[in-house]
Amino acid sequence: MAPTLILIRHAQALHNVDRDYSLHDPPLSKLGHEQCQRLQEHLRTHQPLAAQIEYIVASPMRRTLQTMQESLEWLMQKGIKAETDARWQENSDKPCDTGSSVSTMKQEFAELASSGSLDTIDPDYPSKDGQYAFTQPAVIGRGMSALADLRKRPEKVIAVVSHSGFLRTAIGQAQWNNADYRVYEFTGSNEYGLVLKEWKETEEKGGGLSISEKGKAPIVKGDFPEERVEKVRESLGEQAQGETTKELPN
């Protein structure tokens, strides 16, 4: 049976504060650390499903690793396995959405390194080429690849710490505010890949903490560089249509 997914967006990072996207792989802000504590308290006291988490996976960027450590440490301390997967990194190729070298991350996150949590990072990381390119087909493709691997895992409940741009455009077609989460079940597949259905509880509340925008948020013009997306717009049909917007780095 396919696992249930708790999809978490990282807490506020420094680039979110003043929208300074020139910051390279920024860490959490002071508020971000506070948000992690709030998220942990909520999961432990108000979300029974969280106690059933058997596996944790995170994007290998500073803000997601910090969020994982500070929000899910109570699970990791009980021996729940935590790993990193570069496919869950953010979409854009701006400095704020480009990761740091694996050697740097192992120095900064020594505890995760010693536990082996960083050994699963793709050696190509932090490349923004190939499956990690900032194009619509590449982002959707790695989203489907990441989901396919989770679907095959034996655990019944899995937590993922990722980024709002990637979670919205490649995974859940919804909005995530900082340090909020949504719960999804696998329901099948279509011509684009695997299909998820959000729990009514988090969908109607606007995320598990009721702090995210309600309603669907599909891919729209402006989410990806126009010169790179034009050739795939017809093949994706309505999934790529909508009023013009600008997907800001997250």
Image (cartoon, rainbow, N blue to C red):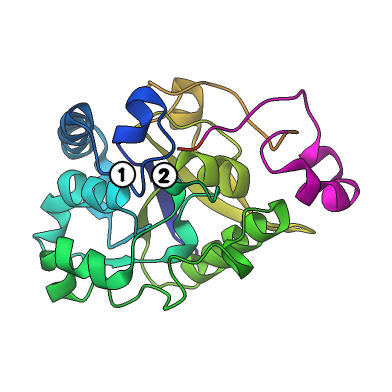
Give the residue drawn at x 28%, y 56%.
Answer: 53
Label 1 sits on residue: 26
Along the line of sight, which residue is nearer the eye, 200 or 16? 16
Visible residue check, residue 209: no
Residue type (three-letter) at the residue carrying disc 1 = Pro
Residue type (three-letter) at the residue carrying disc 2 = Cys
Q: Position of residue 48 (x, y in %)?
A: 25, 41
Q: Position of residue 236 (x, y in %)?
A: 83, 48
Q: Is residue 8 magenta?
A: no
Say which element carries label 1: loop
Compared across the picture, whether 141 is left or right of 11 comes to right
What are the residue bounds of the magenta stretch? 222-248
Q: Is residue 223 magenta?
A: yes
Give the residue drawn at x 66%, y 62%.
Answer: 141
Q: Quadrant of the C terminus?
A: top left
Give the residue drawn at x 28%, y 52%.
Answer: 62
Q: Mark 2 packing: few (<14 Cα in 10 Å), some, or many (20+)?
A: many
Mark with earlier residue (2, 1):
1
Say which element carries label 2: helix
Label 2 sits on residue: 96
Q: Mark 1 packing: few (<14 Cα in 10 Å), some, or many (20+)?
A: many
Q: Position of residue 198 (x, y in %)?
A: 53, 39
Visible residue check, residue 124: yes
Q: Are marks 2 and 1 in contact (CB under 8 Å)?
A: yes
Along the line of sight, which residue is nearer the eye, 107 or 245? 107
Q: Quadrant of residue 83?
A: bottom left
In this view, 206 is above or below 94 = above
Q: How far apart are the alpha carbons under marks 2 and 1?
A: 6 Å
Compared across the picture, whether 72 is left or right of 4 comes to left
**For residue 234, which numbered disc appears in the image?**
none
